[in-house]
Image: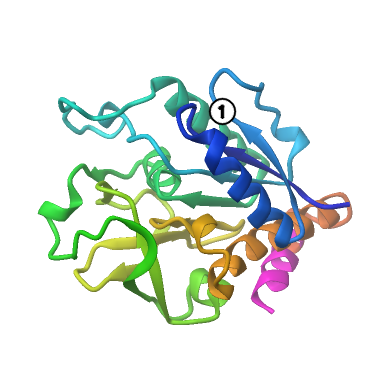
Amino acid sequence: MRPVIGVTVSRRSGWRVFPLMALAIRLAGGRALRWQAGYRRVDLSAVDGVVIGGGDDIAPTLYGGELRVGVRLDPARDALEQEVLRGAFERRLPILGICRGSQMLNVVLGGTLHQDAYQVYASRNIRTILPRKRVRIGSETLLAHSARTDCLYVNALHSQAVDRLGEGLRVAARDEGGMVQAIERVTDPFALGVQWHPEHLIYRRAHRRLFRSLVAAARAGRNNAAQLPAAEAEAEARAALWN
């Protein structure tokens, strides 16, 4: 059976984003389950992995930032995704964070964000769903092994970005201006956050591989959980997506 991946989306844009997520996950061998505030009760026992999707800004009160006029917030979504991530950590489920999802992964682990990252870095402020921004991937990172490259062209729809890293995370990629473009967990289980939107780029193999890596980790974790001690199960999950 296909691993089930729970996907969080915005109440405003979920209707158009979730089908792209579901297609990307299906092409990777999984099956997507939609979660959004007020739509379906979160049941982490029903899934094998998690995607935290993009969209609304994260409330700055969650990481000690300043509340600004005109920022689009969704406190109910913030609460839901904190619950999902903390539950996923407890259950040792693999996680893929996309744009806002990468930022939320960092915040839940105690990190902070730049609220207007383009005022901090010399990065080009390109806002497009097309792959026009170049990012350099760190060697020997989970992202490098997942995408099978050291350089990617990505899209950019964000204004916020990771500032101080959360506990147990490292930078996996930066753009040419030095802005953080991907973060990842330094230990098992799989947890990767990317600042771009790979669901819009599934016509490119490297971006499809991000979903494939998540599904591979979810499948390995599900198959091994009942048969192996936790450390051995996680080692097999990592081997499945790095080979």
15 is within the stretch colored magenta: no
Q: Is residue 196 left or right of residue 113?
A: right
Tell me the residue at 56%/28% (across/down).
36
Q: Is residue 62 left or right of residue 211?
A: left
Three-letter residue code for mark 1: Gln
**Numbered range of the magenta stretch:** 233-243
Q: Nearer the viewer, residue 46 or 92?
A: 46
Q: Position of residue 52 (x, y in %)?
A: 52, 43
Q: Is residue 51 positioned above or below 28 on the image? A: above
Which residue corresponds to the image point at 69% horizontal and 79% vertical from the top-left? 243
Q: From the viewer's perspective, is 158 left or right of 118?
A: right
- The answer to which image quadrant residue 221 occupies is bottom right
Measured as percent of width and height from the top left, residue 98 is found at: 47, 50
Q: Which residue carries the number 1 mark? A: 36
Q: Position of residue 225 (x, y in %)?
A: 81, 51
Q: Residue at x 62, y 44 (%)?
A: 19
Q: Residues within 10 Å of mark 1 (few under 14, many from 20)?
A: some
Residue 118 vertical position relative to residue 148 in the rendered view, above or below = above
Q: Is residue 172 visible?
A: no
Q: Main secondary structure of the magenta part?
A: helix
